[in-house]
Image (cartoon, rainbow, N blue to C red):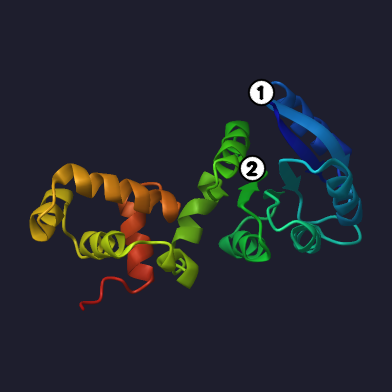
Amino acid sequence: MEAIRILLADDHPIVREGYLRLLERQPGLAVIAQASNGEAALAAFADHAPDIVLMDLSMPGAGGLVAVEAILARDPRARIIVVSMHQGAVFAQKAIAAGARGFVSKSSPPEELVGAIAKVMSGRRALSSDMAQEVAQTSLGKDDIAALTRRELEILQLLARGMGGRAIAKSLGLSAKTIQNNLSQVRAKLDASGDADLVLKAQRAGLTLSG
């Protein structure tokens, strides 16, 4: 199995060195290029076509968000994780809105960055634990809802109204295992950490309304 090829973009050499040491210790990860600003990150992406880009937000010249948008304009399939000292849901939301697949704060444990890479490579969105709760309190977007099947949406609505798995199964005439399988799919699609997180997301999106 080929290693996941990573581009590091951060204006602080000591930070890049720290990431390099962390990532090179992980089986299946390889840092293939580095950049100290947004322009250099775009050039390095064009030259190396990495599997993952780890992008700082605050850099000289073109900042991280500008670089994220420029890279995605070149290749919409690019997988970018913003890694920043800035904390607060607004920064994560801006990064995701720009097209980043994940956001990890620099205060997070090292294993969260490694986990975020694996998560994004599997096609999911990744948020460090210190950001997940804040971001979960925002409403689900139309694209998130559209990704659910009619059955998944129905199950999510019942869950959000306080019904447990067995009650949902009885209400819909399905087996408890089928309900759990559907909930597992919903958690994956909505990047939820568990049923409580699903309920919070559904409530914020207004899915608890009857009808």
Query: Considering the numbered disc 2 on the image, is that residue within a helix, a strand or a loop?
Result: loop
Q: Residue at x 21, y 78 (%)?
A: 211
Q: Is residue 208 left or right of residue 125?
A: left
Mark 2 and 1 residues: CB-CB less than 8 Å, in contact?
Answer: no
- Which numbered disc covers residue 107? 2
27 is higher (above) or lower (below) than 156: above
Q: Residues within 10 Å of mark 2 (few under 14, many from 20)?
A: few
**Residue 155: x %, y % from top left:** 24, 59
**Residue 156: x %, y % from top left:** 28, 61
> Of label 2 and label 1, which has the lower sequence position?
1
Residue ID for mark 1: 26
Q: Can residue 18 be seen in this view?
A: no
207 is higher (above) or lower (below) than 65: below
Q: Is residue 179 left or right of residue 184?
A: left
Amino acid type of the residue that numbered disc 2 sits on in the rendered structure: Ser
Q: How crowded is mark 1: few (under 14 residues within 10 Å), some or many (20 or more)?
A: few
Q: Nearer the viewer, residue 39 or 49?
A: 49
